[in-house]
Image: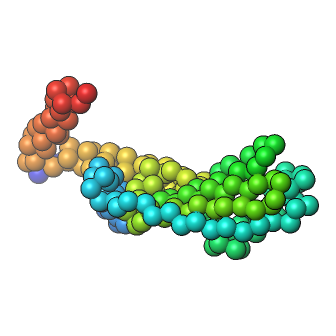
Amino acid sequence: MQHVPLWKRKTAHWSRWLHTYLSMVSFTILLFFALTGITLNHQAALTGEAKPQRFTGSFDMSWMQAPDAKKDDIVAALRSRHGVKADLSDFRVDDDQVQVSFKGPGYTADGFIERKTGKYELMETRLGLIAVVNDLHKGRDTGKAWSAIIDISAFLMTLVSLTGLVLIFFLQKKLRAGLIALAIGTVLCYIVYLIWVP
């Protein structure tokens, strides 16, 4: 019986352990990014037309004299009156109007307030579930917490791939076929890139 060095046995053991449990820990998020990769690639066919909603109202005229000082009040009022939950993306004060924008996954709300009258119009657009998951996939307007999830999932995908690659070297009967499959997959991707990617 051939003696297997201790370092090889340890490497095989830990690679198998890491590959198995990292795959299980990251299963849900990896499946999410796999499926949303498909929806993102076909977003034109899967997303319908946006149907914006229009809201109107008015603010106390005293707020319009120094809108920057009342920024928190204006934002809070729009949130409470119209159920806006997305992050504030822009707050701009001009001579004639105040512009307030909120953005989230598959969601935008843009408000325009007349400084002379205090009247405002808020245009809210909800793009639907497919747009939400596509924006989550891209990390668009999703905040720092979701950005961290993307980084963690990318790190886990890298570890799962590398531990799987290490494991093939311990399967002597499948090593040659496995490396050939790896080479074919890599070359095919490169050929598609060279020939069909503009």
* Residue 183 in the image, given as x and y percentages of width and height: 15, 35
Left or right of residue 129, residue 3 in this image? left
5 or 90: which is nearer to us? 90
- Is residue 14 visible in the rendered structure shown here? no
* Residue 137 in the image, given as x and y percentages of width and height: 42, 54
Q: Residue at x 47, y 59 (%)?
A: 106
14 or 57: which is nearer to us? 57
The image quarter containing residue 22 is bottom left
Q: Residue at x 70, y 74 (%)?
A: 81
Q: Residue at x 66, y 61 (%)?
A: 121
21 or 75: which is nearer to us? 75
Quarter occupied by the C terminus: top left
Left or right of residue 101, residue 166 in this image? left
* Residue occupying the far front of the picture: 117
Left or right of residue 48, residue 59 in this image? right
In this picture the colour scheme is rainbow
- Is residue 83 visible in the rendered structure shown here? yes
Q: Residue at x 8, y 43 (%)?
A: 177
* Residue 185 in the image, given as x and y percentages of width and height: 16, 39
Count of marks placed on residues: 0
